[in-house]
Amino acid sequence: MTERSDRYAREVLRAGRDLGITPRGIVIGFATVSVECDWIMYANAKVPESLDLPHERVGSDGKSVGLFQQQVVWGNGAWWWGDASDCMDPYRSARMFFQRLAKRNYTTGDAGSHAQAVQGSAFPDRYAERMGEAQQLYDRIANDTPNEDGNVAKPDFREINVMGKARSGRGGARVTNFLLHTQEGNGSAESLAAYLNNTNNGVSYHYTVRDGVVCDVVDTDSASWSVLSANSYTINLCFAGSRAAWSRQQWLDIERDLEIAAYLAVQDCRKYGFATDVITRPYRRADGISDHRYVTECLGIGNHTDVGDGFPWDVFARYVRKYTNGESEDDMQLTDEFVNYKGIRVSIKDLLWWLDRHASETAEQLGPWEQLGENDKGEPLRLVDAVAEVKSDVAAIKKLLEAKES
C-alpha cells in the first residue's frame, strides 16, 4: 500500500463509520476495493467527464469508474450508482457501497458473498480471496486514524496464531458477548493453547493471554468450546495461569494482560457490532463484555464463578474506555463508578439497573399485606417499606451519577 492508497482507505473507513457500518462490513468494503481496482483510482474512456476528474489510470470496462468500479449509467430517471463525480470520490462512492451492503445481514455468513451481492461481479470468488489482507489493512488503518472515537495505539503484545480444530460453527447466531475466564492452573498462553487444541479435551477459547503473549486458538467467526449452550453467541478469552480465587492485588500484578484483554474485547465488539458495555454483578442480560459467571448467574448455564470476586473490574473497565473512547493515560483515573454493595464490587450503572428492576418487580407483588419481622429499629417490617428503602437507594445513586456527570 502507498501513501495515496492509505488515504483512500481512510476515506472508505470514514464513510463506513459515519453510516454505522460494523468493522466486518468495512473489511468487506476494503476487500471489494482491492478486487475492483487494487486501490488505484480509475477514470473510463467511455465516460468523458471522468477524464476531467482526479485519477491514476483510464479503464474501459463498461462505464465503471472509481475505487469500487461503479457504473455511471442513467436509466428510468435515476443513476444506477451515481454520476462520475460521486463514483470517483472515495468517500461518496464508499457511502453508496455501504448503503447497499447495510440492506443485507452482512454480520453473518460468507463475507465474500455479501460483496458479490452488492457488486454483481462476473468473478464472484475473488472477494473471499482478499478478505485476509483487507482485515490486516483494517487493523492497521483503524488504529492509526484519528476520528470522533479517538482511537489510540494498541498495547504492546506478541500474537501467535495456533488455531486448531477445537471449534464449531455458530449456526447463524449473532455474536453478543465477550467473556473472560480463568484457567485454574499454572500454564502459559502457549501451553494452555496447546492443551486446548487437543479436541479430546473438549474445551477451547478464542484467546489465551499471559505475560504479554496472545495465542489465537479459535477464529472468532467460529464458536469456541467454553460456555456450553452460550458458545454460539460469545467470544471467549482465558487468562492463562489465573484462578478465580485470586485477590485484587494478584490481578493487578498482571495489569498489562488486563489491558491487552480489554483491547481485544473492544476490537471484537467493533468487528461484530455489539456494545462495549462492561457487565458486572449483579448481572443484567445485555450485549457487552463480562465473564463466565455472567453465563452462570444471568443466563442459568453451568456453574462457573470465574473470574472471581477479586477481579478489578474498575481497572479493566478503564482500559475498555481507553480503547473505545480514546482516553489518554492522564484521563484514566480511578473514579467512583464502582461501589461496594453488600460485599460485591459492582459498577454504579449495573447496580442502579438491578435495584430499579428489583424494586419494580417487588412492588408488583406486594399488595397491602404486612410481613412478619422487624427492621433495624425494632419496628414491624412491611414489604412496602423495604421497597421504599430500595427506591431510596436508587435515588441516591442517581444523584451520584448526576453529580459525576455535571
Image (cartoon, rainbow, N blue to C red):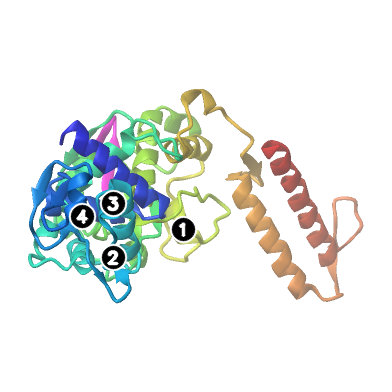
Judge the density around disc 4: few (<14), some (14-19), many (≥20) Cα neighbours within 10 Å: many
Tell me: residue 44, above or below residue 11. Answer: below
Write down the region rendered in magenta: 205-213
Q: CA distance from mark 1 to mark 2?
A: 17 Å
- Disc 3 marks which residue? 85
Tell me: residue 355, above or below residue 153. Answer: below
The amino acid beneath tag 3 is Ser
The furthest residue to the right = 379
Q: Residue at x 79, y 73 (%)?
A: 366
Residue 212 is covered by the magenta coloring: yes
Q: CA distance from mark 3 to mark 4?
A: 13 Å
- Disc 4 marks which residue? 68
Circle 1/circle 2 CB separation < 8 Å: no
Q: CA distance from mark 4 to mark 1?
A: 34 Å
Marks 3 and 4, the one that precedes in the sequence: 4
Marks 4 and 2, the one that precedes in the sequence: 4
Element type at mark 4: loop
- Disc 1 marks which residue? 287
Q: Nearer the viewer, mark 3 or mark 1?
A: 3
Toward the viewer: 360 or 399?
399
